[in-house]
Amino acid sequence: MSETYRAIRLERFADTFRAATEIIEVPLTAPGPGEIRVRNRWCGINGIFDTQIARNAVDYVHVALPSFMGVEAIGVVDAVGPGVTGFKVGDAAATVNFRGGYREANVGPESLFARVPEASREWLALASTGVSALLALEHIGAVKDGETVAISAAAGGLGHLLVQLAKHRGCHVVAICGGLEKAAFVASLGADRVIDYKAEDVAAVLAAEYPARLDVAIDTVSGSIFDAFLGQMARHGRLVVGGAAQDLEGKPEIVTGPRIVHAIYYKGVSVRGFMNGLLTGHWPAARERVFALYRAGHIAVTFDKTRFTGLTGIYDGVERLLSGQSMGKVVVKIAEEGDTRWR
């Protein structure tokens, strides 16, 4: 009997990730020429992206049914094919390519994987979300030392790394988050001003304390947070759009008001889209920089306090992230370090 492993696969389009997918058995194949086989230990959760894929609502990704799911995973190489030069059995390997995340094993070209020091959740977060944070802030946001930087969802997996990267550049950081616990967490990272949107009016605070002073703003929420950032951008400010979580449910809000041109023209402001999947050529250099910052103690990774295990835990992880209650990076432990069994 041939060996198998388990993976989550999109079987139908539906409103939720749970309703659209199933856990299936997949034959465990040997790697071909130029390929490696990795046994995954951890995966990272991207709940909004997963949900939009389940709804067939991601314009830039063509999804043919059935399709494997998940983006981020890290594990250990257990077999290499002919001609492989970058990996050997026992190496830790991470992937941040769609369809490679929510599975117990992965076989593919070595070019789809990155060597990492260890198959731990820390290095997974750095190789995925850490790279995203660095590129959003420096490549798209073009941040300069000492600037004023505003960050929405600052207590999340991406946000808490953005805060630390901006502080490392000597920036004044204005962090937006919801709730006392999250506000205290973000303040502990060094944010200079934390705005708890559940207790304060973000637009009013920015207008009073940072009038036309935001050099860089990174928004993953949209809606009123985007509007508040846009209204207080400095001359030549850069507003980076890295997501639109508020628009996940239902249709995007229809806004009746002055066109965006009136907010950007006279101050030379730019609104820039950040899509990490379009920046693959920048990933290797960004990964090395993030790794170096981590080794030097300039950034740390915080994980959500709720623990999830196994493929079934991925469903709970997605729902935890979508609940808005998570703090830090949400990950799932797929396999124990000493577990060599394929399911």
Image (tube, grey):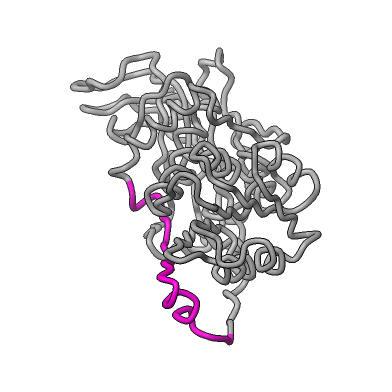
Relative side of 154 to 99, left or right: right
Relative side of 282 to 46, left or right: left
Any magenta on residue 140?
A: no
* Span colored in magenta: 256-279
Q: Is residue 53 visible from the viewing direction of this image? A: no
Relative side of 67 to 306, left or right: left
Q: Residue at x 54, y 27 (%)?
A: 122
Q: Residue at x 49, y 33 (%)?
A: 126
Q: Quadrant of residue 205?
A: bottom right
The percent coordinates of residue 223 (x first, y second) are: 61, 70
- Please tell me which residue lies in front, 275 or 161: 161
The percent coordinates of residue 275 (x first, y second) are: 41, 55
Q: Residue at x 30, y 20 (%)?
A: 87
Numbered label tally: 0
Name above or below for residue 214 compared with residue 88: below
- Please tell me which residue lies in front, 63 or 111: 111
Q: Is residue 142 visible from the viewing direction of this image? A: yes
Q: What quarter of the picture does the N terminus occupy? A: top left
Q: Quadrant of residue 19?
A: bottom right
* Residue farthest along the left direction in this orientation: 83
The percent coordinates of residue 33 (x first, y second) are: 21, 27
- Please tell me which residue lies in front, 314 or 147: 147
